[in-house]
Amino acid sequence: MGKFLLLKQKPFSNLIHLGLKLNRKIKGFTTDYNYSKKENPSLTLEEVEKYNHHRKMGANKNICMATKVNMHFCVDGRVMACCYNKSHSIGNIREQTLHDIWFGKEKADFDKLVNDDYNLESGCYGCKLKIKSGDYASVVAQNYDFHSTKIKEYPTRMEFELHNTCNLECVMCNGDFSSSIRTNRENRPSLPFVYDDSFLDQLDEFIPHLQYADFIGGEPTLITFYYKIWEKIIEKNPGCLIHIQTNATTLKPRFKEQLRKGNFEVGLSIDCLNETLAKKIRKNIIWENFSENLQYYLDEYKKNVLKLTLNFCPMPANIDEVIPMVRFCNQHRIPIFFCTVLSPYECSFLCLNDTTLLQYIGKLEAHDLTSDDYYSKNNLKQLEDFIHLLKNYVQIKQQQKVQAASLLQGDITSLLMAYNILMNEKIIHPEKENICAQLTHYIDQKTQTFEPSVRQEMIIENYLYLAFIEPILVEDKDNYLHLAKHHINGFIQHESNKNIPVDI
């Protein structure tokens, strides 16, 4: 608690910021990437150097430390290197022990692919895209730099995403991450819980080596199995930082008790401080409960009982909340992190034209925020990187205008054919032709009631978005078809709303 108290004092936080900045410069000059020996790298040497210049912990010849320090446990029992790559598994707890997974060939081979060759084509598309676009603050790989100062035999970090139990139905979420959405919005069967006491026992070998344990969902405070893991970590490794990402709408007495026993960092998922807007974004939220819980967390943070961070999902719906949220975090000395929303389409800034994006950029750049300590400097950097991302979107939208003009020369049949061909290039699955045929037929049928010109716009908008995103590794065909159709419906709804006359 003493170190944490020092960090919150302005002179010390400024000193830490300067130290990190100096460390980045020194490492930037001394790092040897041995780039000429990379096989099929996904990034150019210039892109690697620029990314390393912005890494908070300084340059590193390893592009991502997750493969060396982390295990991520998925809902279905698969084990991944990180929370962002859900395509490339290094094992499965239903088929292997934790020991065999960590010390196994699959993990070693994946580490070589990512860090020896800078090849990010096996599910690391998200970080690849963010590095190439210059959205460095949102590169998830940076999260793993903090727990990799000394590479140890065992992982120093674990991430638990064991179930999707959640009480909210947020507009930017889906049923893979919210049981309420899965049941009420998507009408899909509930996910089974595949973890048991055998898994809990196997953690005994690993917990003493952990520096950081991350718990997400769903809503972690509603997943009872997590309480068993927290108790075990507090008993066997009390210094380990336990991070939980919560929507702050539930706060059980049992959880409050855990907070006072362990070394907790609470990540608050908040998208606005406006009750009316919050109820639109986070369906089912009880504002009074949320407000009371938020105040509890702020009070405990001031007492140094716990640490706080805040995750913010900027969307067109809450663009006016961006500066107030940064200001709120500066006021309470909380680091803010911007989470990029790409789906559903209407929640992404990609649904906007370049003119609207430029207007938003102008409003954001006109802020009056100051940066006089570590927290405000971090938060301003997050804002600047978000603005940079929007500027990249402007360029993308301007390029898409040219593509759209070319596509408009064709009829509906040729557009659907082009859409099908592109989808076959993007989807990775043994039955991809069947998947693509189904989705092409679906968009054909769903748009038939619209005027030909509007229908063209809808198909082109789907095509351009598909061209923008990285390849999709489909693991569950039926699940993907369900989500893809839902995504197409969002496109159609968004485009149809643009063509509804508005009374002024």
Image (tube, grey):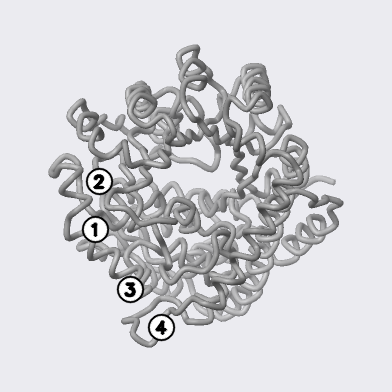
Q: Which residue is tagged 1? A: 107
The x, y position of residue 24, in whole percent, is 59, 67
Residue drawn where x is 39% and y is 72% of the image = 422
Kindly indicate whether the residue at mark 4 contacts the one at mark 1 (C-beta within 8 angstroms): no
The x, y position of residue 438, in whole percent, is 31, 57
Amino acid type at circle 2 is: Arg
In terms of image quadrants, where is residue 224?
top left
Amino acid type at circle 4 is: Tyr
Q: Is residue 420 something that shows in the picture?
A: no
Q: Which residue is tagged 3? A: 116
Residue 53 is marked as: none
Q: Which residue is tagged 2? A: 78
The x, y position of residue 207, in whole percent, is 31, 36
Disc 1 or disc 2, which is closer to the eye?
1
Mark 2 vs 4, N-terminal side: 4
Which residue is at the front of the view, 157 or 339?
157
Whole-angstrom CA distance, mark 3 to mark 4, is 9 Å
Mark 2 vs 3, N-terminal side: 2
